[in-house]
């Protein structure tokens, strides 16, 4: 079982004005970003649910909880609850001042958490700039 919080601070710089969109708009952007993920990666995701939450007041942008894909290929992995990838809306919005910055940050966080699902650790993700 893996718990991994996306604790990186790249992306949007700190500005006085923060971007804020409705939850519905945020979820729409997440869905669009998901559709832009290469199909070879999307096909690998099995038994995973995505969530948007307001999130903690911290620098945690996303969170993966579950059994990473490389550890699923054993006979004991069956009839388990879905893994969770959570994107924290308020943390992701903080510091973004344009739609483009928000979309880029959502993309980076989503790919970061998918990377944890695929079995990558923080060092490997940093080397990929995620």
Image (cartoon, grey):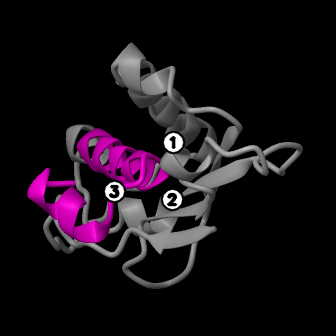
Relative to 83, 69 lies left or right = left
Mark 1 Cα shell of 10 Å, populated few (<14), some (14-19), many (≥20): some
Determine whether the residue tagged by mark 2 lies in a helix, strand or loop.
Answer: helix
Q: Is residue 66 visible?
A: yes
Determine whether the residue tagged by mark 1 lies in a helix, strand or loop.
Answer: helix
Q: Is residue 12 visible?
A: no
Determine whether the residue tagged by mark 3 lies in a helix, strand or loop.
Answer: loop
Q: Who comes first in sequence, dot 3 or dot 1?
A: 1
> Which region is colored magenta?
103-130
Question: What residue is shown with label 3?
Answer: 120
C-alpha distance separating marks 2 and 1:
7 Å
Question: What residue is shown with label 2?
Answer: 89
Mark 3 Cα shell of 10 Å, populated few (<14), some (14-19), many (≥20): some
Compared to residue 47, the image places residue 36 above or below, namely: above
Counting every numbered tag in the picture gives 3
Quarter of the image for residue 123 reads: bottom left
Compared to residue 104, the image places residue 66 above or below, namely: below
Task: Judge whether residue 2 is colored magenta.
Answer: no
**The C terminus lies in quadrant:** bottom left
- Mark 3 vs mark 1: give the one in front: 3
Q: Are marks 2 and 1 in contact (CB under 8 Å)?
A: yes
* Residue 44 % position (x, y): 50, 28
Instruction: In this rendered view, identify the residue nearer to me: 68 or 36.
Output: 68
**The disc label shown at residue 26, or none:** 1
Relative to 89, 121 lies left or right = left
Residue drawn 56% across the image and 80% down it: 56
């Amino acid at each position: 079982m893996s718990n991994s919080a996306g604790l990186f601070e790249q992306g949007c710089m700190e500005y006085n004005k923060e971007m804020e969109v409705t939850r519905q708009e945020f979820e729409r952007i997440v869905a669009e970003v998901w559709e832009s993920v290469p199909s070879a990666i999307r096909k690998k995701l099995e038994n995973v649910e995505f969530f948007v939450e307001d999130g903690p007041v911290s620098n945690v942008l996303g969170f993966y909880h579950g059994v990473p894909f490389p550890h699923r290929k054993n006979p004991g992995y069956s009839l388990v609850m879905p893994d969770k990838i959570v994107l924290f809306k308020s943390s992701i919005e903080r510091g973004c001042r344009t739609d483009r910055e928000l979309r880029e940050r959502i993309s980076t966080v989503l790919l970061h958490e998918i990377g944890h699902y695929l079995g990558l650790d923080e060092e490997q993700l940093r080397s990929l700039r995620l």
